Amino acid sequence: MLIARQRRRLLVWRIAAIAAFVLALVAVLPRPGRVGAMHTQAPHLVRLKLTGLITDNTDRIAAIDAAAKDASVKAMLLTIDSPGGTVGGGMALHDALARFAAAKPLVAVMGDVAASAAYMDAAPSARIFASPGTLTGSIGVLMQSPDFSGLLGKLGINVDMLVSGPLKGQPSGVQPLSPAGRAMLQGIVDDYDTQFVEMVAAGRHLPVDRVRALADGRPYTGRQALAAGLIDQIGDEHAARDWLAAQRHVPATLDIIALPKSHRAASRRTLLLRLLREDDDGNDADSASLGAMLWRTALPPALREAIDARLLSGPVALWQP
């Protein structure tokens, strides 16, 4: 009896091991539109999905540069559903997309939101498509510096700070921002904003003064953006494929393959973001993490994005509803 039970238990474990092996094999096999298929030599398009908050991502930039050099890649579809992100991350991605656009056709298709740094990254596209209800634009930069000195004073807590220069400790969460510090930070924001405007003007082939008139931070609907010259056409991915076929001779029958999934650079993320955030493709950074599951299911997406925005350090190009 004991031997029979042991044999049955061993059989169950063997079956479980075989099933796990089969599932693992299926997971790594190339599938249409997935990462593994990037090794194909047949002509195809690549799709870059830009979702969530934009931050530094060297892997994603490397994948874009590799696609620009791959002779089998005929064009890129940039699909966007993002409120923006950090200035540095947005600018780095913009430059990579501009390099691709200089070599091959790049078209952008906007979803619900493609604002601020996300609009910046759409700017190098040969043609930008959006729906009438898309929220886009929001050209500008912001920097937030919380000041807890009043709260600390009520608690009887004083913080002494030694600095090597009058602007070294600006901004500080434990002391009010000085007039000189405010002027210094405003200068940084203004310079970033000028760079943003120049990127849009270059990508959209518009005069800088025209873009600056549109760059007061406001978002535009898809219809408003079309009238302002910030996008080219109301349409979806099918319209983008038709345009590529008619204007860039990229057959509409070519397969679309996703760029390899990238890993967000951890050096620019807080510990909380590393534990709870989702990656750029909308997948949990760690699908086995209880924190990631709670972050994904317990809070509305808009609230998660707002909290993430407060956790990002440095200036951001972000639309905040």
Image: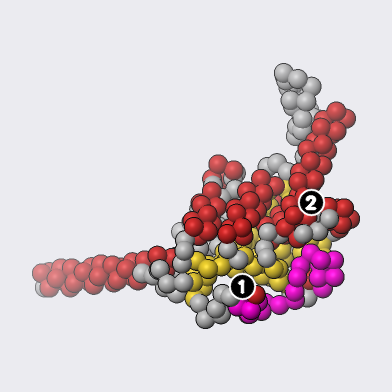
Judge by depth and name the residue closer to the eye, 124 or 8: 124
Determine which of the numbered discs, if any, sits on residue 197 in the image: 2
Query: Dividing the image into 4 quarters, which one contains the C terminus?
Result: bottom right
Residue 233 falls inside the magenta stretch: yes
Q: Can residue 43 be seen in this view?
A: yes
Residue range highlighted in magenta: 223-246
Q: Which residue is drawn at 70% across and 41% down?
A: 314
Rendered image quadrant of residue 80: bottom right
Rendered image quadrant of residue 182: top right
Which kind of residue does numbered mark 1 sit on?
Arg
Judge by depth and name the residue closer to the eye, 83 or 226: 226
Q: What element carries label 2?
A: helix
Q: What element carries label 1?
A: loop
Question: Which tag, 1 or 2, sits closer to the chain's start?
Answer: 2
Rendered image quadrant of residue 245: bottom right
* Mark 1 crowdedness (10 Å alpha carbons): few <14, some 14-19, many ≥20: some
Q: Is residue 242 above or below residue 101?
A: below
The answer to whether the residues at label 1 and label 2 have Cβ atoms under 8 Å apart is no
Q: Which residue is drawn at 36% across and 66% down?
A: 28
Instruction: Determine the main secondary structure of the stretch shown in magenta.
Output: helix
Residue 231: x and y in percent read 76, 67
Q: Can residue 177 be seen in this view?
A: no
Which kind of residue does numbered mark 2 sit on?
Val
Residue 78: x and y in percent read 61, 65
Residue 315: x and y in percent read 73, 43
